[in-house]
Image: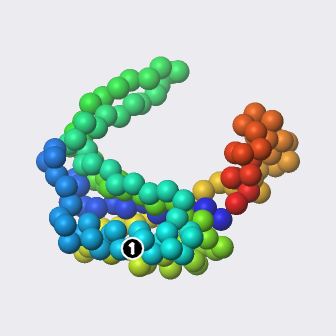
Amino acid sequence: MRFMMIMFPKEYTNAKAGWVPDLKSMEAMGKYNEELGKAGVLLALDGLTPPATMSARVTFKNGKSKVTDGPFTETKEVVGGYWIIQVKSREEALEWASRIPGGDNETVEVRRMFDMTDFDPETQEYIQKKFGDEVAAEMRQ
């Protein structure tokens, strides 16, 4: 099963353009990320800059898109980064999430990613034909 762990750091809401985490935080997160890698569960990860740094939103209405440049003053929660992990169960994903070296004002949401078993056979066949064996195999994991 694949899960995405999404970090919501409260400090991002008001962070100025150019803000970066301090070295101590980076070292702790680096150690955690190494543990994920050594355990063989890490598929992807990345940190995101605060919304004040070149952010934009694309909204959709009536089949048309509209781009709005940030920062966004009404934002209450901002994604600061994510991990994609592959584990055997929800419980294992939650165990990894509980080991993240998060601060007092940080929250991590853990969400399972779709896999082929979520779809009916007709949709599975469509995915296989449309996107090929590689995507279908990835979704089976």
Q: In the figure, 106 relative to 113: above or below?
A: below
Q: In the figure, 56 relative to 110: above or below?
A: above
- Along the viewing direction, whichever of 34 and 56 lies nearer the viewer: 34
Categorize mark 1 by other alpha carbons within 10 Å: few (<14), some (14-19), many (20+).
some
Residue drawn at x 35%, y 26% is 67
Q: Quadrant of residue 117?
A: bottom right
- Mark 1 falls on what kind of element? helix
- Along the viewing direction, whichever of 21 and 103 lies nearer the viewer: 21
Residue drawn at x 61%, y 70% is 87
Q: Which amino acid type corresponds to the residue marked 1 in the rendered image?
A: Tyr
Q: Is residue 87 visible?
A: yes
Percent coordinates x, y for residue 22 in the rendering: 17, 64
Q: Is residue 4 left or right of residue 17?
A: right
Q: In the figure, 75 relative to 21: above or below?
A: above
Find disc 1 in the rendering and name its residue: 32
Quarter of the C terminus within the rendering? bottom right
Residue drawn at x 72%, y 45% is 134
Q: Is residue 74 left or right of residue 95?
A: left
Quarter of the N terminus within the rendering? bottom right
- Along the viewing direction, whichever of 11 and 25 lies nearer the viewer: 25
Q: Is residue 132 left or right of residue 30?
A: right
Count numbered badges in the picture: 1
Percent coordinates x, y for residue 58 in the rendering: 39, 31
Q: Is residue 97 visible?
A: no
Percent coordinates x, y for residue 49 in the rendering: 27, 48
